[in-house]
Image (tube, grey):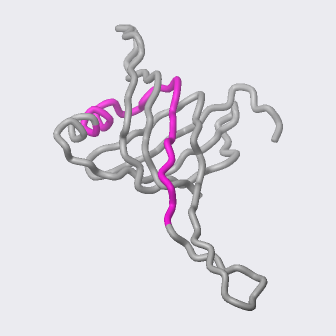
Amino acid sequence: MDFLSGAYFEVALTGENVDLTGRFTSVSGLNMEVEYEIYNEGGSSYPRFFYKESKPQVLVLEQGVLIDGDGFSRLMVQCVQGQVLPLSGTVTLKDSFGVSQRTWVITGAYLQKYMGPELNSNQAALAVSRVELLYNGCF
């Protein structure tokens, strides 16, 4: 893929009465890892693979601005109260013209860590330094 100058990631993850919607300059952890059990039958030279489980991944969103700060605040309050609710949605890579280049679908993501930025009273949106979400992989 060619380098996309001015590109950004548009994130839209929603849950029950909460959401994490915004634009981020860096996204990592768009992975999928699956574990299989290998079974060898006697007399066969071809092993059989059986799905065992998917391994949790960490989706990291960095250097962004949240569009709906209230939805994210509700998500943090629910986490503090022990109400763990999954988020589902998309992460879309957009070029400098706002045209979608690639989209990943995320399901069952849970807030794991939030790191806020230095506060600036001149910004209306909620800036974010880093958000980490635990999830089972993307497609």
Task: Please name the residue shown 27% across and 35% down the image.
Answer: 76
Which region is colored magenta?
A: 53-75
Front residue of 66 and 108? 108
Residue 98 location in percent, x, y? 64, 37
Q: Residue 131 appears at what percent x and percent y?
A: 44, 32
In the image as oriented, which residue stretches furthest toward the left? 81
* Quarter of the C terminus within the rendering: bottom right
Quadrant assignment, res 72? top left
- The location of residue 103, given as percent across then percent down, is 62, 50
Q: Residue at x 74, y 91 (%)?
A: 43
Q: Residue at x 41, y 55 (%)?
A: 108
Rendered-image quadrant of the N terminus: top right
Q: Is residue 74 magenta?
A: yes
Direction from residue 96 to residue 28 in the image, left or right:
left
Residue at x-position 59% and y-position 28%: 25
**In the displayed structure image, the side of residue 72 where residue 1 appears, left or right:** right
Q: Find residue 109 and report its horizontal and vertical position in percent.
A: 41, 49
In the image, taking residue 37 as reference, residue 126 lies left or right, namely left
Q: Is residue 64 above or below residue 106?
A: above
